[in-house]
Amino acid sequence: MPDIGWQELLIIGAIAIIVVGPKELPLLMRTVGRWIGRARAMAADFQRSMDDLAHETELEKLRRSINEIGDEIGATDPTAADPEAAAIHGGVVMPTSAGEDPVPPSVEQQADRQAPAPRSGTGSL
């Protein structure tokens, strides 16, 4: 932004009065003010568009990162790709060879997980 002091404004005003005349000066100033307002509005709109574009670009990068992380998790944890299978199998997936479905836990494994811990003490009531 140009740095204009009071002396420069006084000189510009004096020249404007001489060139345009005192009668048309308010109309000229109003017109110049409208043009400056339109230029500022266009600059603000351009700035907003650039900010939106940058925001969308950042969101797209974030989406790609999240998808990559999800792919990595899905590659290491078979239940991550199929939450229904994880719920059916109680979250326990037995290792299998490549290409096979995960083996559900046996009845004993499920009972061991659900059985209450033995109490220590006399045991008589």
Image (cartoon, rainbow, N blue to C red):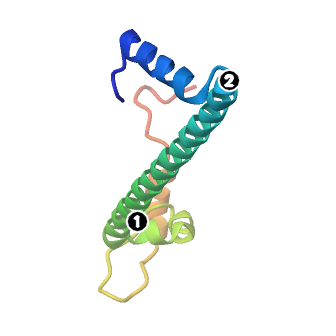
The amino acid type, in three-letter code, at marker 2 is Pro
Secondary element type, mark 1? helix
Disc ID at residue 26: 2
Q: Please tell me which residue is depicted at 32% across the width and 81% down the height of the picture.
A: 96
Q: Please tell me which residue is depicted at 43% across the width and 39% down the height of the picture.
A: 118
The amino acid type, in three-letter code, at marker 1 is Asn
Name the spot of residue 81 as percent of width and height, x first: 46, 71
Q: Please tell me which residue is depicted at 43% across the width and 84% down the height of the picture.
A: 101
Q: Please name whichever residue, 22 or 124, is drawn nearer the observer in this view of the structure.
A: 22
User: Which of the marked residues, 2 or 1, is nearer the chain's N terminus?
Assistant: 2
Image position of 23 with respect to 35: above or below: above
Residues at circles 2 and 1 in contact by the CB criterion of under 8 Å:
no
- Between disc 2 and disc 1, the foreground one is 2
Q: Quadrant of the C terminus?
A: top right
Q: Choose top left, top right, bottom left or bottom right for residue 109.
A: bottom left
Q: Is residue 86 left or right of residue 95?
A: right
Distance, label 2 to label 1, CA atoms, is: 61 Å
Q: Is residue 58 left or right of residue 48?
A: left
Name the spot of residue 58 as percent of width and height, x first: 40, 54
Q: Is residue 7 visible?
A: yes
Q: Choose top left, top right, bottom left or bottom right for residue 94.
A: bottom left
Image position of 57 with respect to 81: above or below: above
Q: Please name whichever residue, 22 or 28, is drawn nearer the observer in this view of the structure.
A: 22
Q: Please name whichever residue, 37 or 100, is drawn nearer the observer in this view of the structure.
A: 37
Q: Is residue 105 visible?
A: no
The mark total stands at 2
Name the spot of residue 6 as percent of width and height, x first: 40, 10
Secondary element type, mark 2? helix
Disc ID at residue 94: none
Q: Quadrant of the N terminus?
A: top left
Disc ID at residue 67: 1
